[in-house]
Image: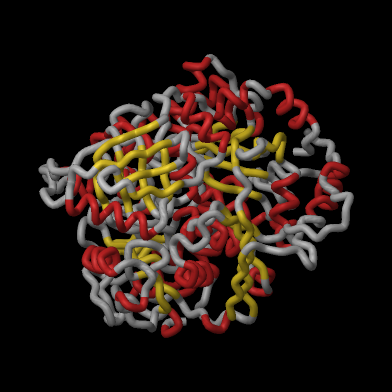
Amino acid sequence: MAYDKFTILKSTAVPLPIENVDTDQIIPARFLKATKREGFGDNLFRDWRYNNDNTPKKDFVLNNPIYSGKILVGGKNFGSGSSREHAAWAVYDYGFRCVVSSFFADIFKNNSINVGILPVQVSPQFLHKIFTAIEKDPKAELEVNLPDQTITLVATGEKESFDINGYKKHNLMNGFDDIDYLQSMKGEIKSFAESRAF
Amino acid sequence: MDVVNTSKFIKMNNKPSTLFDKVWDSHVVRKIEDGPDVFFIDRHFIHEVTSPVAFLGLESRGLKVIYPERTFATADHNTPTINQHLPVVDALSAKQLKALEENSKKYGISHWGLGNPKNGIVHVVGPENGITLPGMTIVCGDSHTSTHGAFGAIAFGIGTSEVEMVLSSQCIMQPKPLKMRINVNGKLGKGVTPKDVILYIIAKISASGATGYFVEYAGDVFEKMTMEGRMTVCNMSIEMGARGGMIAPDETTFNYIKGREKAPKGADWDKQLAYWKTLKTDAGATFDKEYTYDAADIEPMITFGTNPGMGIGISKLIPTAKEVSDGAATYEKSLNYMGFAENEKMIGKKVDYVFVGSCTNGRIEDFRAFASIIKGRKKAEHVTAWIVPGSHIVRKQIQDEGILDILTAAGFQLREPGCSACLAMNDDKIPAGKYAVSTSNRNFEGRQGPGARTLLASPLVAAAAAVTGYVTDPRDLI
């Protein structure tokens, strides 16, 4: 999929200090019926965000105008459960370009990178610092620097580095995806396939 | 496709290797420095929900399906479980089902849609038709693809971008996971099923404790288990964060596969069997993490919270926030959602719905277990029960074995196959606030319908709840 290149992102952030946020919460199954990938942002966190009568739940963070930004900060084990890429589409479609947590579920992490969202895994201590900073000042900014692989609390300059493999980093910084790469090595794949027994 | 080139699989050195390494390493097309492996996929399953956008992607790039014979389509996620012979009422579901049918036809992919006698849940129909074989790599846009690991395959769920990769190149880009072995030894007690074994393991390891790992299940409990039981165990590997779980193939595996429609036959069978027999972890091979449990410590399990790691032995009390690893706020949110409190007993809690089915417990053995308890009893009046076979083949077995008669006599109806109330994409939704004992795999908030409260358990615990109307220890009814 084509997505915007990712280099440096400086933004306020939306805090969601809940652990084990599973992909059924990010986008409930009943909203998976589309045959296109656009529009999932409207139902991001649907059942936490809206009452049964579709009125917004006032206490949910996405309905609180104090918080905004392109960075979502979640508790540990973010994105667990179902492999639905719709969860990553919903996060992207809503306007987030980066998700920060102390721990990500594997499939969500893969899916995120594949759609152009940068998952940034920080230490539990740094995550705590981020939550505290946003709690104190909802307009507190974070700077995520992909080339340097660092995340910084802008107000205090406190910084941590994060891991990402060189291949995926290159893809995100250039807006490339895996399909381009795989297409470029089709000959090699075909000879491998011919050697397979089944 | 029929010739087995065994030289490719036999390691030339004598270094001990794990089952996982043997299968993984033989599927790496290219290793990328500081990046993932280009990983070859033998079998690819698709369904109506996670494939349409992948096909759109192919079209927009002008790509073809590289090996249509390696992909298999079945409709399951949003199909109705009654009146399948009638047109699907929900317009969006109907559109997805139509897209699957048309895309399959356009690209020459085998399609078992609604009404096809082979139709059913993707992770039930793959194995029962002999598509799933030892030593294979298998993916599907569904996290419970881990089920197929029961055959000694590397099988895991992928996202839609990866579905597009497999369709167009038969490969995905995967970093090799770490290795974990989980041993369970000893003898399981009365009323303790494979579902209880895996719920026990997840409760011990937590819903995220195996993230980053691929699991091998070993020990005499798994060696003695049937293929249906092994599938139940491997199915829920993802619920502790693992991409997948696998069990070394043995005589039980080979006997299950032999004679199934798409299984190898004749000389081809002999050749593949010889290879399959090499698929085990060598003595002295090492794992990044290893856990060992005693079968005697496991009792029938039930969950009380909103992730599959929140399970306890059915006779135990709901733990306090201090006893669990999650933060207190998260734990409190979860218990509030369930309407439960610390230190409460699970036994005796009122049950409104019972769901038997899903890719976890929708196979014949699960319905035999359920029937063993309801036989000669009646469904509790206040309980609504949805009994949903995993496939039409399972449904026919239920009829042929006389289980349907037992169900009918006890006041239960048998529905048509599909994912059903496991994820409630169709009309099988548990109403808000109601309690469902469910043989499925996830008790997340709203998973079985907005506001629904799920108690995950085995078919025996489901049967005990269905006839008493309350959470009941099945050992009292056996």
Question: Residue at position x 45%, y 66% from top?
Answer: B206
Name the image colouring.
secondary structure
B225 left or right of B327 in image: right
Q: Position of residue A138 (x, y in %)?
A: 18, 46
A187 left or right of B243 in image: right
Q: Position of residue B194 (x, y in %)?
A: 54, 69
Q: Position of residue B146 (x, y in %)?
A: 56, 52
Residue B5 in view (yes/no)? yes
B473 left or right of B247 in image: left
Residue B88 in view (yes/no)? no
Question: Residue at position x 66%, y 27% from top?
Answer: B67
Above or below residue A9? Residue B291 is: below
Residue most toward the front?
A157
Above or below residue B20? Residue B86 is: above
Question: Residue at position x 26%, y 54% from top?
Answer: A131
User: Dividing the image into 4 quarters, which one contains the C terminus of chain A?
Assistant: top right
